[in-house]
Image (cartoon, rainbow, N blue to C red):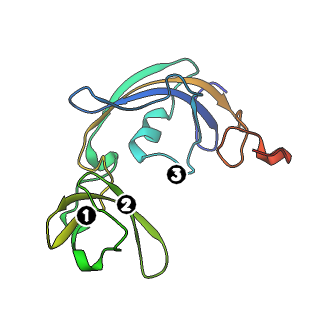
């Protein structure tokens, strides 16, 4: 495995920062992120930056919002009458909530405003509209997963072990 290509399993150490330098995510202190190239597991720009990289190669790149989590969509900011909010819920600005769609799916949202009559929620991804800078290092290139596949808890559930 000389270079990163589609269908390969690639392990990456990374740190992601916002334009102001704030770290929003990092693999530091954890196992490197392992992805299957071409499987759509990552934002498009991140995966595109990996293509052609070599083992132990390092790279720093910045993604425009269009190649990351997209542009903020004002249509995804909605107001709900307080009477529509479950009585046991005490909505507060900044709170993360899950909204249920008519077909039973859940959509993550953040409460961005609360007053006496309404609650305003933003269903955009929290990083929508942000340019993101990543410092990455390819630490593994394999034809098969190097890390156990399973429930994502870190154990090898696929072998019949319990979590």
From the viewer's perspective, is 158 left or right of 139?
right
Q: On the image, numbered disc 3 is attached to which residue?
A: 40
Q: Position of residue 124 (x, y in %)?
A: 29, 58
* Position of residue 3 measured from the top left corner of the image (x, y, whole percent): 58, 28
Residue at x 23% of width, y 54% of height: 93
Residue 89 badge: none
Question: Would you name the residue on which mark 1 appears?
Answer: 121
| Comparing labels 2 and 3, the label whose residue is closer to the camera | 2
Is residue 158 shown left or right of residue 11?
right
- Depth check, front residue: 110 or 42: 110
Front-most of residues 88 and 17:
88
Instruction: Give the CA separation, mark 1 to mark 2.
Output: 9 Å
Residue 82 horizontal/vertical position (percent): 23, 74
> Which secondary structure lies at badge 3?
loop
The residue at the far bottom in this view is 102
Instruction: Name the image quarter holding the C terminus.
Output: top right
Quarter of the image that includes the N terminus: top right
Name the residue that disc number 2 marks: 97
Query: Distance between the Cα atoms at labels 3 and 1?
Result: 27 Å
Badge 1 or badge 2: first in the primary sequence: 2
Q: Secondary structure at mark 1?
A: strand
């Amino acid at each position: 495995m000389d270079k990163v290509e589609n269908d390969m399993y690639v392990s990456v150490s990374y740190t992601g920062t916002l334009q102001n330098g704030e770290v929003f995510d990092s693999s530091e202190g954890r196992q490197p992120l392992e992805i299957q190239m071409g499987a759509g597991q990552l934002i498009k720009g991140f995966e595109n930056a990996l293509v052609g990289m070599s083992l132990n190669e390092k790279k720093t790149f910045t993604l425009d919002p269009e190649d990351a989590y997209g542009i903020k969509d004002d249509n995804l900011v909605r107001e709900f009458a307080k009477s529509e909010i479950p009585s046991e819920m005490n909505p507060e600005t900044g709170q993360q909530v899950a909204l249920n769609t008519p077909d039973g799916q859940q959509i993550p949202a953040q409460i961005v405003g609360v007053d006496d009559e309404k609650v305003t929620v933003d269903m955009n991804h929290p990083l929508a509209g942000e340019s993101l800078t990543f410092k990455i290092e390819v630490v593994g290139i394999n034809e098969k997963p190097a890390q156990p596949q399973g429930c994502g808890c870190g154990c090898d559930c696929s072998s019949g072990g319990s979590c």
